[in-house]
Structures are given as structure tokens and as C-alpha cells.
Image (cartoon, rainbow, N blue to C red):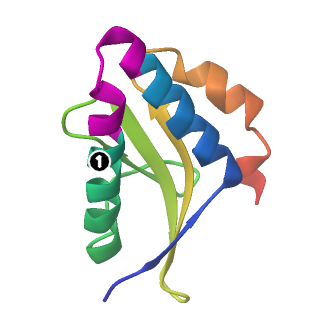
Amino acid sequence: MIYTIIADPKVKEDLKEARDFLNSRRNGFGKKFLSEYKATLKHIQKSPIFQIRYDDIHCLPMKTFKYMIHFKVNEINKTIHIYAVLSTYLNPDKNWIKRGDVLRK
């Protein structure tokens, strides 16, 4: 069963920041990052059950880049809500402090 993906509006900001950061390190890395992100989403859509890290939030690390996708799965509605795409290398706690309201939804 393919799940429907719903992305929090802040995910778009995460992706832009990651793309810009990676491009600043090496030209073209941002494009590769976005391509890998899309491929990872397709994988999640088909099989969304990954380790729950906290508050019913599943986390899946991307293969090449040091970023992790944070999401919740709704088995009843067959939806996946993406809350964040955060670097595992940079300070992820700082990002979640800004988003404390996300986990209360």
C-alpha cells in the first residue's frame, strides 16, 4: 500500500537550507541531496515503519548525506506527515527547540 505524504511547511525551509549549505561546500551537492530526498520519500511511502525515536516520531537517515527525515505514520488514514529534515552533523536540537509546537499536533 502506498501512503500519502504530507509535509509540514517548515520542511521546505529545511530542504532549501540543506541544499544551499551543501552547494556552498561543493557545487551540485544540493541537487544530489534533493534527488536522494525524493528517492527516500518513495521508500518511506512503500514501507513507512522505521524506528520510533521519540513521541511517536519515526526517523530515517538518508544514505549519502548526514540528514534525517522525521515523520509520523497514520495507519488509519494511510498518511505520513513529514515534520523535519535535519542534519545529524549540525546541531539538530537547536532546530527542534524552534519547532516544539510540532510535536503537540
Task: Decide whether residue 31 is among the magenta residues.
Answer: yes
Dot 1, crowdedness within 10 Å: few (<14), some or many (≥20)?
A: few
Side of 99 relative to 36 (left or right): right
Q: Residue 100: horizontal and vertical position, in percent?
A: 75, 38
Q: Please say if 76 is above or below 88.
A: below
Q: Along the line of sight, which residue is nearer the eye, 12 or 56?
A: 12
Q: Which percent across, then down, holds residue 72?
A: 52, 62
Residue 19 appears at what percent x and percent y?
44, 30
Q: Amino acid at mark 1?
A: Ser
Q: Nearer the viewer, residue 69 or 75?
A: 69
Q: At numbered mark 1, what does the secondary structure look like: helix, strand or loop?
A: helix
Quadrant of the rendered image containing residue 23: top left
Outermost residue to the left: 64
Is residue 89 in view?
Answer: no
Which one is in front, 64 or 79?
64
Which residue occupies 27% across, 46% down? 36
Residue displayed at 69% across by 52% down: 9
Q: Quadrant of the N terminus?
A: bottom left
Q: Residue at coordinates 33% horizontally, 53% vertically from top-left?
A: 51
**Is residue 45 rendered to the left or right of residue 19?**
left
As rendered, which of 16 and 46 lies closer to the eye?
A: 16
What is the residue that sits farthest to the front in this orientation? 27
Q: Residue at x 28, y 26 (%)?
A: 28
Secondary structure that dominates the magenta span: helix
| Count of numbered marks | 1
The residue at the far top in this view is: 25
Instruction: Estimate the x, y position of residue 7 in percent, counting from the top left.
Output: 58, 60
Q: Which residue is mark 1?
A: 35
5 lies left or right of 2: right
- Magenta highlight range: 22-33
